Image: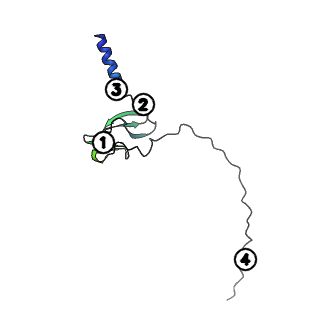
Amino acid sequence: MLKLVTLVAAFVALSSPVLSYECVKNATYDWPDPENCRHYFHCHNGTLEKKSCFYLFRFNPSTLTCRWWMLVNCTAQPFTPPPTVATTALPTTELPPTEAPPSELPPTPEPEPSFK
């Protein structure tokens, strides 16, 4: 009996897909499941959830939404990567003030007075 339980547990472990996708914190977005076009990953604030489209709908990797199955090309690649959040701010360097280059043009002459 113990061998049967061990065998079943090993089979379940090998047949269950391992989610290797990591969600970005402070962002909400959907991303296609590369194994099945009917499923997609929903990421919300760093939490990953696997979701399914409605019956006869498939997840469109180009629009990142569920669409009617006839309108979806499951082999298409998403057009944008999932959003990224910067983890550290880069230090800013203040530049010293610069002087304007000297003018190469001659000064503008004063207009001559007009008499009416």
Between disc 4 and disc 2, the foreground one is 2
Residue 11, image x, y percentages: 32, 21
Tag 1's secondary structure?
A: strand
Q: Residues within 10 Å of mark 4 (few under 14, many from 20)?
A: few
The residue indicated by pointer 4 is: 110
Q: Reading the chain from its start, which is encountered first: label 4 or label 1?
A: 1
How far apart are the alpha carbons under marks 1 and 3? Answer: 21 Å
Residues marked 4 and 1 touching at CB (< 8 Å): no
Q: Which mark is residue 58?
A: 1
The residue indicated by pointer 2 is: 20
Residue 42, image x, y percentages: 37, 37
Locate residue 47: give its quadrant.
top left
105 sits left or right of 84 in the view: right
How far apart are the alpha carbons under marks 4 and 1? Answer: 75 Å
How far apart are the alpha carbons under marks 4 and 3? Answer: 86 Å
Residues marked 3 and 2 touching at CB (< 8 Å): no
Which residue sits at x=71%, y=83%?
113
Q: Hey, which residue is sitting farthest front in the picture?
A: 75
Residue 87, image x, y percentages: 53, 37
Q: Residues within 10 Å of mark 3 (few under 14, many from 20)?
A: few
Residues marked 1 and 3 touching at CB (< 8 Å): no
Residues marked 4 and 3 touching at CB (< 8 Å): no
Which residue sits at x=40%, y=37%?
43
Q: Which mark is residue 16?
A: 3
Q: Along the line of sight, which residue is nearer the eye, 112 or 104? A: 104
Q: Which kind of residue does numbered mark 1 sit on?
A: Arg
